[in-house]
Each structure stands twice: as C-alpha cells, then as structure tokens.
Amino acid sequence: MIKLGRYIPVFSENARGKARNLSASGVDDWLLRLPREQGIYLASENSPYDHAEDDYDSQYGHSDADAIERTIGRFILDAAGSVPETVLEVACGTGHLTASLLHDGRIRRLVASDASGRFLEITKRKVASLAARDRLDLVRLADTDFDAIPAGVFDAIMMRSALHHFVDFKGVAATLVKKLKPGGALLMLEPRADFHIAGSLILKCAKAKAVQMGLPWTEAHEHHAGDFISAAEFYLNRTCDKTRAEDKYVFHIDELMEIAHLTGTHLKCLGGEYRSTFSSNFHDFMRYCMRYDQSVLNDIMEAAKDELAFMDRAYETKPRYAAAEWFMFRRE
C-alpha cells in the first residue's frame, strides 16, 4: 500500500538532546575516518562534472549578486513541517541549496557532499560569509560509495535536482532511505513529467498560432521549440539507453509512488520552491535551462498566451505545479 502523509518529528522533546548527541557522534565517527584536504573530507575519488563547474551557476541565470538563494531553505523546512537536526545533502553542486539552508539557520549540522571536488570548492566559497558556516562539513562522495554512508545517523537526506542523473534512480533512492534514522526523511527536488508534456503540447500549438496571429516563425523558432520537444521525448522514454546522458529523466507521480512503496515510506508533495505560475515556470525554464533567445521566447509566449493563461487558471488554487517539485519520503 502506498502511504501518503505528513512529516512527523523524528524525536520527542524528552529524547531530543540524547538523539542529537548520538547524531553528532555518528557523523564525526564517519568523517574522522576519512582523509581531508583543504577542509574537504575525501570519501571518493574525484569525479568532475560533465560540464565546466565554474559556469554552472550562470547557465541557470544565477549571478554573484544572487549567489545565496535566501528563500529555498526556509520553504523546504516549512513545507516539511519539521526541522531535522542533522542533514546530509547529496550532489550539492555549487551549493545553491547548501547556502540557503545555512542562511535559514535552523539546521544544527549539515554535511554537503558531491562527487566533484571543484563543486565543493565553489560551495565552500559561496558559504564563506554566512554565520552558520561552522555547522557545515564538506565531503567528496560519489554514488558508487553511497553504501559507505553511516546508517541511522541522519534525520534527513536532501537532493536538489540530482535523482534524474542516476540510471537506477529507484535503487539510489532506496539506498539513501535505508541510511536514514527511523522517522527520517529523504527530500528531493525533481523535474515533473507533467510540465514537459504540457510544455511540448504548448510549443506544438505555438507554431500554428503564430501563423494565425501573424507572428514570426523562423528556423530559430523551429529549432528552439524542437529542442525542448526532443528533450522531453528523451526524458519521458523508459526503454532507451541513458547511460551517457547527463539529464536522464523527468518523473511521473506514479514513479515516485513506486519509490514510496519500495522503501516503505510516506510520500508528500511539497510543491515548487518558488511558488510561481505555470507561465512564469515555462518562461524561465525555456530562457535559462533551454537557452532560448529572448526575442524568440517573446514571440512564443505571445503565440501561446491563451494556452499559458489556461494553465495558470487551472493551477490557480494549486500553485505547487512547476517544472520541478519538492517531494518528501518519510521513514516510519
């Protein structure tokens, strides 16, 4: 039976102090067995990202001016309904989530990990100005060594846009859930299949609507629209070989429910981290993730304005709908 539910605090108030000490000691026991270089614990060999790590933030429209996202950490913890004491972040990348959680300040111990040493260096630099930086440990950790994560130590494990990089995403999720304390939670932001299906249909309609409205539809428009549709078809495919692809999947809700069933966890949908409209999500995804030329995107937004307005109205009372959504799997 699939269990849907609310995150219940891991410990009662009477047991909280003792549990905190056990958590701290378990984390330290793990980390102190590892070699350390320049403030980073080394649990795995270095595995550079497929693309230049230093350009990663700019690819998604992040600049030095907004290097620390100030709302995501608060959103996740508030939506979860409880604040975990000790957290492991998997695949932290450039520290977008790491910095936001530290800026929020409620988590007592955060261990941020990534397979790329360069990503960890960027994360270390990004959090340097934060008062809570002393609560952070950085670990170079690849998925091949997830089994070495100590069990029963972490109240929560978090991943922001990481599960879709793993071919065996169900196996990875199951491994991480097993590492949690009883009552602990695996929280993840992942792309939704619904958005990619709806977005593809909107782009297919936009070409015909552009002709009707007398708007341009050039080779550039066709190229941009085709890029997204082709990518969506690949992400939605469950039969082709995805081994060499960086981004492999977008997820159907029933696939996440299967993970909950497989791991014996309660599944809760927390929503999109920015709580914006579908049309805003559509615009930003095409602009930053798909690298659409702004003038081409303006034409597409105009051609598809009726369809986008419909989507906005359809989800007006359910603002969680987004290109990606946070999900929580809580152990009993």
Image (spheres, rainbow, N blue to C red):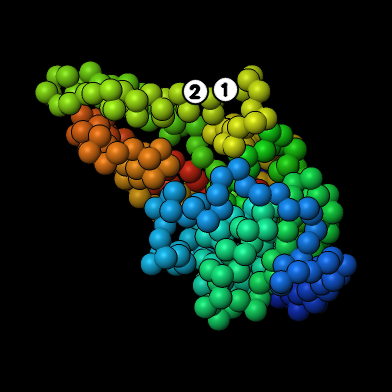
Q: Residue at x 72, y 67 (%)?
A: 40
- Residue 70: image quadrant is bottom left
Using a 10 Å C-alpha cutoff, classify the residue at mark 2 as few (fewer than 14 neighbours), some (14 to 19) or many (20 or more). Answer: some
Q: Quadrant of the N terminus?
A: top right
Amino acid marked by disc 2: Glu
- Residue 263: image quadrant is top right
Q: Residue at x 27, y 37 (%)?
A: 297
33 sits left or right of 7 in the view: right
Give the residue at mark 2.
Answer: 233
Q: CA distance from mark 1 to mark 2?
A: 6 Å
SS at circle 1: loop
- Answer above or below: position of 63 versus 280: below
Q: From the viewer's side, name the closer residue of 177 and 58.
A: 58
Residue 31 pos. (x, y %) = 81, 68
Residue 97 pos. (x, y %) = 55, 60
Give the residue at mark 1.
Answer: 237
- Answer above or below: position of 278 versus 109: above
